[in-house]
Image: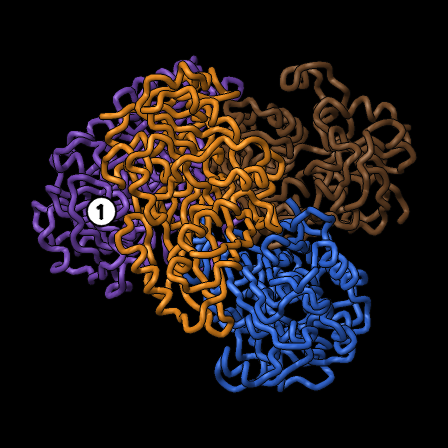
Chain colours: A brown, B purple, C orange, D blue
Amino acid sequence: MGFSAAVAGASGYAGGELLRLLLGHPEIEIGALTAGGNAGTLLGQHQPHLTPLADRVLAETTTETLAGHDIVFLALPHGQSAAVAASLPDDVLVIDCGADFRLEDPADWQRWYAGEHAGTWPYGLPELPGQRDRLRTARRIAVPGCYPTVASLALLPAVAAGLIDARDLVVVAASGTSGAGRSPKPNLLGSEVMGAVSAYSVGGIHRHTPEIEQNLRKVAGGPVTVSFTPVLAPMPRGILATCTARTQDGVDAAAARRAYQQAWAAEPFLHLLPEGTWPTTAATVGSNAVHAQVTVDERAGRLVAIAALDNLTKGTAGGAIQCMNLALGIAETTGLSTVGVAP
Amino acid sequence: MGFSAAVAGASGYAGGELLRLLLGHPEIEIGALTAGGNAGTLLGQHQPHLTPLADRVLAETTTETLAGHDIVFLALPHGQSAAVAASLPDDVLVIDCGADFRLEDPADWQRWYAGEHAGTWPYGLPELPGQRDRLRTARRIAVPGCYPTVASLALLPAVAAGLIDARDLVVVAASGTSGAGRSPKPNLLGSEVMGAVSAYSVGGIHRHTPEIEQNLRKVAGGPVTVSFTPVLAPMPRGILATCTARTQDGVDAAAARRAYQQAWAAEPFLHLLPEGTWPTTAATVGSNAVHAQVTVDERAGRLVAIAALDNLTKGTAGGAIQCMNLALGIAETTGLSTVGVAP
Amino acid sequence: MGFSAAVAGASGYAGGELLRLLLGHPEIEIGALTAGGNAGTLLGQHQPHLTPLADRVLAETTTETLAGHDIVFLALPHGQSAAVAASLPDDVLVIDCGADFRLEDPADWQRWYAGEHAGTWPYGLPELPGQRDRLRTARRIAVPGCYPTVASLALLPAVAAGLIDARDLVVVAASGTSGAGRSPKPNLLGSEVMGAVSAYSVGGIHRHTPEIEQNLRKVAGGPVTVSFTPVLAPMPRGILATCTARTQDGVDAAAARRAYQQAWAAEPFLHLLPEGTWPTTAATVGSNAVHAQVTVDERAGRLVAIAALDNLTKGTAGGAIQCMNLALGIAETTGLSTVGVAP
Amino acid sequence: MGFSAAVAGASGYAGGELLRLLLGHPEIEIGALTAGGNAGTLLGQHQPHLTPLADRVLAETTTETLAGHDIVFLALPHGQSAAVAASLPDDVLVIDCGADFRLEDPADWQRWYAGEHAGTWPYGLPELPGQRDRLRTARRIAVPGCYPTVASLALLPAVAAGLIDARDLVVVAASGTSGAGRSPKPNLLGSEVMGAVSAYSVGGIHRHTPEIEQNLRKVAGGPVTVSFTPVLAPMPRGILATCTARTQDGVDAAAARRAYQQAWAAEPFLHLLPEGTWPTTAATVGSNAVHAQVTVDERAGRLVAIAALDNLTKGTAGGAIQCMNLALGIAETTGLSTVGVAP
């Protein structure tokens, strides 16, 4: 129990998943739990699965309540992280699960989120080439969005190896409902989502688009454009991203597979499935694993890469813990599993 | 009750949906119900929702049991329709829900299904330009597959109007599990599919691909290539198809919407949603309706058309009844609803 | 189209189901659609499955907007029906889907709902002995709650035939989420209910309890007490009620079955399943049917009766239409189906 | 890594859950994995979530393949355990997840299972009074069925404290589909179970009934009779058991709560929820926890106790690991979590 961690936004889904993982983490002592509107209530009312913390009272999210921890996780609505982070000492490890510090280009922020750009923090995707080392010394980390995590990982090896035309990438990703958060909205009622697959934010307007492009641009050696369509699927957790792009001349399935094997050979959480096997989100539930497969449809001239992960774990809280481990100088996989809870 | 109809394959999902619709059809008397391995059992054991027919004994699928009806629906495994159809008189209306007679090019059949090509019947998609009139006089009709129905309808107006590059169409479609039929397989168990989205037949190998291309080629004025990825979603019914393609110069969202409005103005079952609204499969359950929306992602240079339908209704049995109505000379919408059962 | 009908509360689940059924009803013209907070918006925003009415603007629920119809359906929050009903002429058929007028005993109302008792209207359960005839002349009808419908129907034959001890009835009923309505609450989010079965209102505190007892008391010839436990199940529609009670001496499964057969012989919507077959809610979805089975566990000395129905159809809106048909003097089954939408 | 464990039946759901837990257990090295019909295939084909073991080849279940381990888990179809166990040395810890050795009375076995009774092993429910100590020295352990675990735990404190009439207990329990195993059957297809709640084995015929009675008889001081109705719910995991019984005179909710608090004060996996809170299966998924609540419906004169657990974890594999820990002399909670994976 070397380090103490506070979680701001403990009553939401990201906060709950952070706490689930921290409860199983051997090096962390859980400190303050804070909330917005739910401050003053018991954690058990919101997170009935976290029985060891059931009697904890949620504090207000303030400088005072978050003070004195080694690590502070922010799982707040967009736009609230900057003020909180500014009040924390520089040597505190602050890990933001929100969007505020993910984008590097203020013009991107302006275009997709509007309002003032809070700044840019080291981006919490260790699998991005070169990024792991940066995270080891970071004290401020911006964890990627769930869609950018899965889409970027699915496409990075193909883009980096120059197998595809990165100027016209097509991503269609089906997500479970927890990705939409816990604020009750009519369209997220169980009655509405069970038995239904629906599309939303269609036509290049989803805010995760620039983040995917920013990640792929790091390895593309040229312009990157993504057409991204998110789809809502009737399950609580999981994203399956289907990514396709035109292949460069002569690229076949074997070449594609080789590129992924090489890129992921040393990655603890990225799992290329056996040839002919395609991912299911169910196999990743509760784990920090990404399951993926790639092939080339030679007739259509397109590479197809499909990746699955748990949006709350590797897509948010597990990714955050992975970054924390790096920044704390402990084994990257501590407290994280590659084994899903299935069926 | 002017016409009598037999259903071969009455214990499967397509057969059950045919019977559900025929029970509500004012012009049809339900005749023989036949099955393969389930012959000799009661329909009620297999279709507990069809209580008015619960005590009907399933007969063997033979020339004799199917004889003497005005209409014979075939909902049989691939490869079994030809022999049955050959034994039925030419003036009997035979409607095949299987794949045997859908493809026009024997080479396509050979490539995608292997074995001998049974032949080609008039294709049961009335919304395909010119097809409605052909169906009015047909006595043999091949009903489209569920994926080809939704993908073709989603893309036909854009291809016909020359808005997109038809040589590189990308279709990612999420389907409910009933599309995989009723034969018990481990991967279709409830324990496996609930809480899971998974991909299958990836890389241009799904047999519905040539059928989509065949349909779009009718209006394309040039070559058509589709990259098609099917996805299995945790719901019994419904398909949501996300279709994207590069736009031709100058095509914007308004132009796209106009093309769909014009193409579908007189279509009783094709419903272009209000601007800004995207389809959910839930709204189409049990109905013969297709809900769709289209836009252009100008930044990415791609048109995105999304369509939803019930794979068992408009995608199979409802489409079959629609064709039957045309071939019988009665109102095309008889016995079919545009209203889904939701939530 | 002999009669015009208005629906107050058209943007909720009960209202939507009423409209779905009325759209298929041959004798009804749909008139005013009204709402509370959603007044001024389009119906299509709330009920995307009701495309024929998509462009209808929701009016305020007022005396004026509801005036001039032959029938007015009230699908309002509890406590709002009385004032609206009082403003409508006596010869208008008013059918209330809420609780306000269901209970006969003001003391019951006081105990379970608190506040002033609005009064008692003829109870809209035609299958209650003697009730069908009363409904034929009624101009005010209180439609039962969904749980009381299924639990009462499941137990009526056994209580009426004196097979069981009615002073100690045990009902455990699992309901889909639409029974909880459309107001967004955190515990009804898809993320919460998918993959979860939970209990609520346990310990004899659910307000449907006195309604079940009131129904069974009509045939019991003595006191009736029900222990009722509602359970929330991960599906949009359907209730399965498991009802058990101590058998009187000498009652066996055959006797129980006979009692149900006799009681239901002429009932168009009550379906006793073949011996050995137990109900599934799926078979009743969208239909007005009740599927049931009964047996006696002789070792334990208990009768077990299980019934399934669609809470929105027979449990609410279908039951309302059935009552309307009776009150209008048209065939009781008009516009209602006994065939579910399955799988 | 002090102990080696083999799992017979590794390709099924119980086997998969055993392996998931063993992979996270600090004292166990996973040895032979065996199967019946799936012998010769890779584990990864059947358990895609267990990536660290994906390349393991499933061996035949034989004396030879199971030899040489400290612990052998049997997750076999009923009737196969006895022969396998007989071939293993007496000092090997054999833990059977099947029914063969659970019942003490050969007459019970004969009545409920037919065929010869294999014998009786120490019963793997540590929470049964006195049982924990017996398990510490056992080398053969029969793990309870999933329903008996939840129903027995829900009722034990009330029966032991004499709060209720144990001669007439009523249990209605809704289970996820994994409890029905992995053999593909038509009624377990996703298309059938999604959107459906159904009853089965009704009327006192489910084989878990005598096991529940056997457990409660240990504390009842008199005869015990259970009326048990299992219900299938649309979720992969979880059981919610609703248990009611007539209260003895003067028993109120406070007395009931006290009895449970006292009985469970030292139990690491039994969690009595805060007053007024009722369990949801979702909060227990993947954990070894049981969440429960109890009250008294004084009007109806019945105690209502409701418990939730994960049928594959505490209901099968987690319970088995808990017993293993006891028998190995290590901490009972090793490798087991009380924290569920939610939402």
Q: Is residue D107 above or below residue D130?
A: below
Picture coordinates of residue A143 (x, y %)? 73, 33
Q: Is residue B87 left or right of residue A343?
A: left
Residue beneath disc 1: B96
Does residue B104 appear in this view?
A: no
- Residue C58 image-quadrant placement: top left
Q: Is residue A175 above or below residue B294?
A: below
- Residue A150 image-quadrant placement: top right
Within-10-Å neighbours for mark 1: few <14, some 14–19, many 20+: many
The mark total stands at 1
Q: Is residue C49 above or below residue B250?
A: below
Q: Residue at image x 82%, y 25%?
A: A84
Q: Nearer the viewer, residue D149 or C304?
A: C304
Q: Is residue A29 left or right of residue B300?
A: right
On-image quarter of the N terminus of chain C: top left
Q: Nearer the viewer, residue B23 or C114?
A: C114
Does residue C319 appear in this view?
A: yes
Q: Nearer the viewer, residue C56 or C137?
A: C137
Picture coordinates of residue C310 (x, y %)? 41, 44
Q: Is residue D22 left or right of residue D246?
A: right
